[in-house]
């Protein structure tokens, strides 16, 4: 099982090294949250190319041919796996109610929801929470660090990228013995996630704005809100918002 954690850790370390070696943005218009902007824009162009050539067409085909009931089941299945990992991170963040809710959701949906294909817990009004190890690090006071765009994975921060190997280990899929099944589920999760963004991405592509800047600002705001559980959040007053801002 060790290699299942070492592999994403090595990839993440490689990307971080390349980003930091790529130089920093400078000038009066440089965003202090994004000193790696030249590197990030290059990775964004690469990701957009892969998306146009492969991922978006596959997601469009999946959206067109897959019945809604099947897509709902797929989404529920992956959400159920996330509930188990949320329970762990809620405990690490000293959120007992969220941990109990998430554990109950996972148990109920796994046993009575056909392995998570049905969301029985939501029908029973058990609240769903979303926590990951990046949020846990943020709650512990670890700075977000610079904004970072990861190849194929998209928007992140140095903190979230550092948490990626742990999140990969905790997602449930990683521990399956069958390598072919693991990669099939990873692929299905990626396509399902991309299909859910089709409408939003079409609107963004047609809008007269800098898509890179818009995506960065939205991502950083959403992640800041997630770490602070939706409470009003001012990144300029939060010492953990960035490792570079002063």
Image (cartoon, helix red, strand yellow):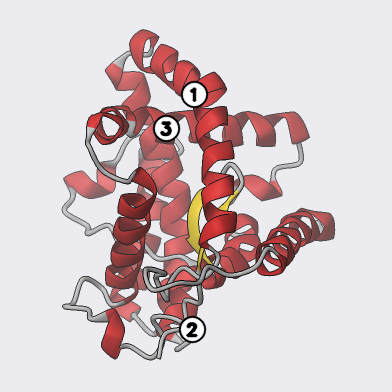
Q: Residue at x 65, y 68 (%)?
A: 23
Residue 16: where, in percent of width, then height? 68, 65
Q: Residue at x 22, y 59 (%)?
A: 127
Earlier-in-chain disc, 2 versus 1: 1
- Would you say residue 185 is visible in this rendering? yes
In the picture, residue 49 is in which quadrant? top right
Q: Secondary structure at mark 1?
A: helix
Per the image, the residue denoted by label 3 is 194
Earlier-in-chain disc, 2 versus 3: 3
Q: Residues within 10 Å of mark 2 (few under 14, many from 20)?
A: some
Q: Nearer the viewer, residue 245 or 100?
A: 245
Residue 109: where, in percent of width, then height? 37, 45
- 178 horizontally vs 215: left or right: right
Per the image, the residue denoted by label 1 is 52
Q: Nearer the viewer, residue 188 or 221?
A: 221
Q: Secondary structure at mark 3?
A: helix
Residue 125: where, in percent of width, then height? 16, 53
Per the image, the residue denoted by label 2 is 244
Q: Residue at x 75, y 35 (%)?
A: 178
Earlier-in-chain disc, 3 versus 1: 1
3 and 1 marks in contact (CB < 8 Å): no
């Amino acid at each position: 099982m060790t290699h299942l954690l070492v592999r994403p850790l090595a990839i993440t370390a490689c990307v971080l090294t390349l980003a930091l070696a790529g130089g920093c943005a400078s000038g009066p218009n440089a965003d202090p949250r994004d000193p790696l902007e030249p590197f990030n824009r290059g990775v964004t162009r690469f990701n957009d190319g892969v998306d146009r050539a492969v991922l978006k067409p596959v997601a469009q085909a999946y959206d067109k041919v897959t019945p809604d009931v099947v897509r709902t089941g797929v989404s529920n299945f992956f959400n159920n796996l996330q509930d188990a990992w949320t329970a762990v991170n809620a405990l690490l963040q000293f959120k007992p109610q969220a941990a109990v809710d998430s554990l109950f959701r996972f148990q109920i949906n796994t046993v009575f929801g056909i392995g998570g294909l049905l969301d029985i817990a939501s029908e029973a009004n058990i609240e769903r929470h979303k926590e990951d190890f990046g949020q846990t690090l943020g709650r512990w006071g670890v700075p977000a660090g610079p904004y970072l765009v990861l190849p194929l994975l998209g928007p992140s921060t140095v903190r979230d990228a550092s948490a990626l190997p742990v999140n990969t280990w905790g997602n449930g899929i990683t521990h399956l013995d069958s390598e072919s099944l693991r990669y099939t589920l990873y692929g299905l999760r990626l396509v399902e996630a991309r299909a859910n963004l089709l409408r939003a991405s079409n609107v963004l592509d047609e809008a007269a704005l800098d898509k890179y800047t818009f995506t960065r600002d939205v991502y950083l705001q959403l992640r800041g809100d997630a770490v602070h559980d939706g409470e009003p959040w001012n990144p300029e007053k939060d010492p953990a918002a960035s490792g570079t801002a002063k």
